[in-house]
Amino acid sequence: AKVMRACETPEQRDASVEQGRLRMSASRAIETPEVRRYRLEEDRLRLSASRALENT
């Protein structure tokens, strides 16, 4: 699946990101605050990393 990512359109990527977000929010409903905080921190790092890649 990771190989396919390269030739995806931005729309497709947004859709899969949205799907992942929905799936994650569904699982987050049963998480502890500690786990949620860790997950949010991870998301923030991933976001800033992908944003840095886009800007190059």
Image (spheres, rainbow, N blue to C red):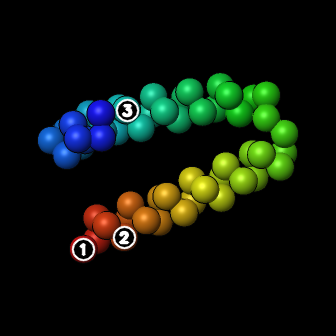
Look at the numbered disc 3 and give the secondary structure of its residue: helix
Q: Are marks 2 and 3 in contact (CB under 8 Å)?
A: no
Image quarter for residue 10? top left
Q: Is residue 32 above or below residue 34?
A: above
Tell me the CA gap for discs 3 and 1: 23 Å
Question: Which residue does the numbered mark 2 point to in the structure image?
Answer: 52
Give the numbered dot on residue 18: none
The three-letter code of the residue at mark 1 reads: Thr
| Of the image marks 2 and 3, the number of the one nearer the N terminus | 3
Where does the image place residue 13, in percent across and percent down from the top left? 30, 39
Tell me the CA gap for discs 2 and 3: 20 Å
Tell me the CA gap for discs 2 and 1: 7 Å
**Residue occupying image coordinates x 60% and y 56%:** 42
The three-letter code of the residue at mark 2 reads: Ala
Question: Which residue does the numbered mark 1 point to in the structure image?
Answer: 56
**Residue occupying image coordinates x 28% and y 71%:** 55
Q: Are marks 2 and 1 in contact (CB under 8 Å)?
A: yes
Where does the image place residue 52, in percent across and percent down from the top left? 36, 70
The three-letter code of the residue at mark 3 reads: Ser
Q: Do the residues labelled 3 and 1 touch (CB within 8 Å)?
A: no
Where does the image place residue 29, in percent across and percent down from the top left? 75, 29
Question: Which residue does the numbered mark 3 point to in the structure image?
Answer: 16
Along the horizontal axis of the image, is 7 left or right of 48?
A: left
| Of the image marks 3 and 1, the number of the one nearer the N terminus | 3
Look at the numbered disc 1 and give the secondary structure of its residue: loop
Look at the numbered disc 2 and give the secondary structure of its residue: helix
Specify the farthest residue to the left. 7
Number of residues whose C-alpha sits closer than 10 Å to that of mark 2, classed few (under 14), some (14–19) or many (20 or more):
few
Residue 11 shows in this picture:
no
Along the horizontal axis of the image, is 37 left or right of 8?
A: right
